[in-house]
Image (spheres, helix red, strand yellow):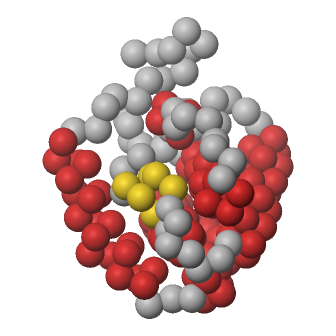
Amino acid sequence: MLTADGLPIVEPMEVQDVRRLAIWSKRVLRPMAAELTIKTACDTLESAELAFRETIFELSPEQLTENPAEGVMSPIDILAHITVTQTWQALRLREIRTDEVPPDDDVNILFRGANEKPYKEVLVGYIAAWERLLEEATSASDVMQTSKHIWFGQLTPKEWIVSAALHFDYHRSQLDPFADLTDAG
């Protein structure tokens, strides 16, 4: 099913998926964030982004657009997804810092992918979004004020930063099979 502008509509998450994310948030995300300072959370975020960037930069132009399977994002779609997500995460961190309320979350935009955009255009957007996220993360303070994540509930600045780092790690792991092919070639 597509939107009026021809983009895929994200189906509502199954109840079990939402529960799984809530459990993950409680068992992994929140305890990890509790162990870190804002500085170490930002260091973790920067390391995760670097590993993601190094992995995606290893891929050939052909690998970037390769769709591994139906319903699985190609590397360029993952890059586009990360770009949108970084923008959203930066807005949430900014909301905590300034009380500036961001627009409502549109889950559909998170999974639109590159939508046939050329790699260089997606990459320019990615770099701008990364710089914005890093600026907001390093400007964050260790407060208990929160902003709502659509699946994890209310997150503190540290939890937002750690969730961003873990998000990079998750999607970098999706790129590993492509990077393995590059190494083998």
Where is residue 45? Give x, y as percent: 61, 76
Whether residue 11 sits left or right of residue 168 in the image: it is: left
Q: Is residue 83 visible?
A: no
Q: Which residue is rendered at x = 51% and y = 14% of the image?
A: 3
Q: Which residue is rendered at x = 46% and y = 52% of the image?
A: 148
Whether residue 62 sits left or right of residue 27 in the image: it is: right
Where is residue 158? Give x, y as percent: 54, 75
Where is residue 38? Give x, y as percent: 61, 83
In the rendered image of this protein, does residue 39 appear above or below residue 151? below
Where is residue 23? Give x, y as percent: 23, 64
Q: How many labels sit on residues? A: 0
Q: Is residue 96 visible?
A: yes
- Residue sticking out furthest to the left: 16
In the rendered image of this protein, does residue 92 appear above or below residue 6? below
Residues 69 and 29: in front is 29
Q: Which residue is rendered at x = 27% and y = 59% of the image?
A: 22
